[in-house]
Amino acid sequence: MVTLVFIILLALLAGFLGLYWRRLFPRPAAKLQTGTQETESKPGELPASYGKDQIVVMVKDPYWLYAYWEITDKKRAEFRRQFGPDSWEKSQPMLRVYDLTHNLYDFLHAPFFEIAITENADNWYIQVNRPCHTFCVDIGRLLPLHGFVTLARSNIVTTPADQPSSKIDPLWPPLQACWEAVAQQRGLPPGISSAELLALIRKD
Amino acid sequence: MSQGYVALILHAHLPYVRHPEEEFSLAEKWYYEAVTETYIPLIRMCQRLAEDKVSYRLTISLSPPLASMMADAFIQKRYLKYLESLRELAAREVWRTRRDPHFHPLARMYQQLFEEVYRFYHLVYKNDLISAWRELQDAGQIEFITSAATHGYLPLIGLQREVTRAQISIAVNNHRRLFGRPPAGLWLPECAYNPGDDEILREFGLRYFFVDAHGLLYATPRPRYAIFAPVACPASGVAAFGRDLESSEQVWSAQEGYPGDFDYREFYRDIGYDLDYEYIKPYIHPSGLRVDTGFKYYRITGKSNYKEPYIPEWASAKARIHAGNFLFNREKQIEYLTSYMDRPPLIVCPYDAELFGHWWFEGPQWLESLFRQVSALPHQPFVFITASEYLDHFPVNQPATPCMSSWGNNGYNEVWLEGSNDWIYRHLHNAAEAMIALANRFPQAEGLQLRALNQAARELLLAQSSDWAFIMKTGTMVDYAVARTKKHLLNFWELKEAVEAGKVDEESLTALEEADNIFPDINYRVFAST
C-alpha cells in the first residue's frame, strides 16, 4: 500500500517536472500555414517573414544599391519538384543585377552581372558604381545543368547623378558665372571637387 | 525690381512623442526644450519685429507631428508642468548663486527668460501655440508650409506610390485643419527628393519644395543659373529651390560656422550634470539619470574642456557682428551674380529651426539682428522673400528634373539606409502593402471597422517617421527608436487581422486611439490605389 502511494506520488512529481520542463524549454511554435501565407512571429517581435516570394531593391547612393528578399518554403518545394530533390542544396544562391539603362524592360538583351551570395543571407549591399543607371535585381540559384534560375524579380530603380548633367537645354544655356560662383563656395556637393567642377564648366 | 533676393527657411520638426503612460519621458523632453528654447523665442522675435515695423520675410515649415503636438491638450498641460518645474529651479538657482558674481546674473537671466516664456505660453496664449503661429501667418510676413505627414523619408518608404500620396495628402489636410488655409509648398523631409514625387505634390496644390544644392546642380538638363534660381519639374511644373552652400556652411558648421564662436553659450555644460545630486534630483530623470536642465552657465571659451562663465553681452555683440557678416557676404554674393545674371539672383538658406535657440542659444538674436540690420540700411542690398513671392515674380522657370538627393551626410540616402537601420524597410514596405490592400478591399467601412482602419493608417504612418532610422544611425536612444518602430508596426498588424476577421475589439481599439492620437480626422482611404 505504502509502495503504491509512493509510486503515485512519484508519478505526479514526474508529471509536474515534465510540465515545468516544457515551460522552461518551449518547443518551436508550429508554423501557421494558411494558404500561401506563412507568417511567423513571436509576441512583441515583428514577423520573421511575410509569406511571399519577393525581392526589393533600394538606392543608397550613386554607387550602391541595397536589396532584401524572402523566398517561401512553397517556392523551394516547387524548385525541388522541377529540378530534383537535392537541387536546392546543389545550387548556389545568386543575385543577378540587370543594367536596364539602355534596354528598359528588355531583360534578354540587358547587360547584367551576378553576385554569389551566402545561403542564409536575406539582404545585400550591391556595389554598382554607376550613377544615372537603371537596375533590376533577380534573386535566383545557379544550377550546374540549368544555369541561373530566377526565383523572384525586384522593382526597378535608378541611381542618382554624382556630377552636373552633360545635357544642355539650348533655351537655357548654363551661365558660367553662376557655376563658377558655386565652384568657389565652401562645402561643395558630394561626388565632385572644386577643380573637377570648374574643369567641367569650362569644357562646355 | 530688386538686385537680389534671400529666402530664409526654418524647418521645425520633432517626431510625435506623447507618452501619457510615463511619468517622465525623455522623448517628450525634446519637445519641451524646443518649445522653451526655439519656438517661443522665434515667435517672440517675429512679434518684436512686427511691433517695430521691421519688414522681413521668413518661410517656416512646421511638420505635421510637431504641429499636432502643439495642438494636443495633454501635451499642452504637460508642457506647463515642465515649465513650472523650470521656474521653480530658476528660483532656487537665483538663491543658490546669490553670492556668486558670475553665475548669479546668469541665474537671473534664465529666471527672466522662463518667466517670460510662462507669461507668453500660459497667460497670453492659454497653452495654444498654434494660435500664436496663426497670428503671425495673418500678419503676412511669414509663409507657413508643411512637411510629409510623419516626416517619412520618401525615397525609401515610397516603394509604393500610395505611401507617398498618403504622406502628402494627410500633411496638407492637417495643415489646413490647424492653419485654416492650404500650404503653398512642402518641405521634403531631410530634403529627400525622389524624381516623380513632384507630381504628387502638384496633385495637392503644392507649388514648391526644397532640395540640397547638388539636387539642383545635378539636375537634368543642367540648370542655367546653378542654384541661384529654382527649376520647374517638367511633368508637374512644381518648382524646386536649391540650398545655397556658402550661407548654409556659415550657419551650420559647428567648427567654422558662427555657432562655434568662443563667446557663445556652451551647450554641453549644464547644471543637470554639474551640480550636487541631492540638489538637482527633483529636476532630472526620476531614475537618477542626469539630464539637461536648460541652465547652462558657461561660454564655449575654447577648444578644450576648460570653460569660463557665459557673458550675455559679449554673446549678443557677437550675434550682431555675425549677422553683419552674413549680410555682407550675401551682399557681395548678390553683387557678383547680378552683374552676370539676366534676372535677380536668389539665395536660398534653409536651416533646422531647432538650431536656433536650442543648439545655438544666440541663434534667434542673430536672426533678429539680421532682419533689423538689413531694414535699417539706406539702400537695400537685397530683399528677403518667400518662395511663393519669388514664384509670383518669376512664374517661368527652366524645366529640369532635380536628382535624387537629401541633405544628409554625403548627400544621398545613406544615413537612413545603412547597417543599423536597413532592417526596418522590409517591415515598413510589407505593412504599407497590407494597408493599401485593406484600403482597396474595404472602400466603404463604417463604425468600428472604419475606426480600426483609420487607426491602422495612423500606426503605419507613425512607424514611417524618418526619425527612427536616424536615431538608430546616430546611436543615442536607439532602444526607443527600435521600440517605436516595432510597437506601431505590431499595432498595425493586430488591427489588420482584427479588421479582416471582422472582430474588432472596441476596448483595445479605444486604447490605441487614445495612445496614438495623431491626425484626428484621418481617412484611411488615402491609401487606396487610384
Image (cartoon, rainbow, N blue to C red):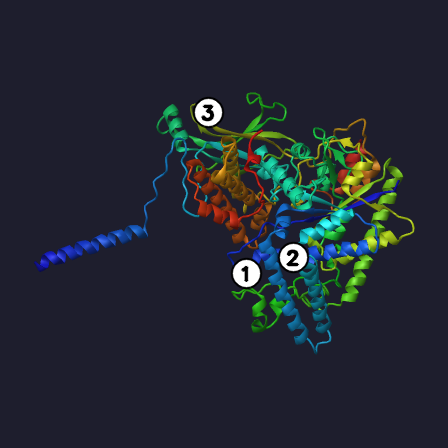
**Whole-percent x, y for residue B182 in the image:** 69, 40
**Whole-percent x, y for residue B306 in the image:** 69, 68
> Mark 3–mark 2 contact, CB under 8 Å?
no
Q: To which residue does mark 1 refer?
A: B24
The type of residue carrying mark 2 is Asn
Residue B433's label in the rendered image is none
| Residue drawn where x is 63% and y is 30% of the image | A133
Residue B127's label in the rendered image is 2
The type of residue carrying mark 1 is Phe
> Mark 3–mark 1 contact, CB under 8 Å?
no
Label 3: how many Cα within 10 Å (few below 14, some 14–19, many 20+): few
The type of residue carrying mark 3 is Gly
A16 displayed left or right of B276: left
Discs 3/2, front: 2
Discs 2/1, front: 2
Q: Please report, as a chain letter, where disc 2 is located.
A: B
B83 or A149: nearer the eye?
B83
**Whole-percent x, y for residue B470 in the image:** 59, 48
| B79 w.r.t. B180: above or below | below
Label 2 vs 1, first from the N-terminus: 1
The quadrant of the picture occupied by the N terminus of chain A is bottom left
Residues at marks 3 and 1 on the same chain? no
Outermost front residue: B447
Residue A147's label in the rendered image is 3
Residues at marks 3 and 2 on the same chain? no
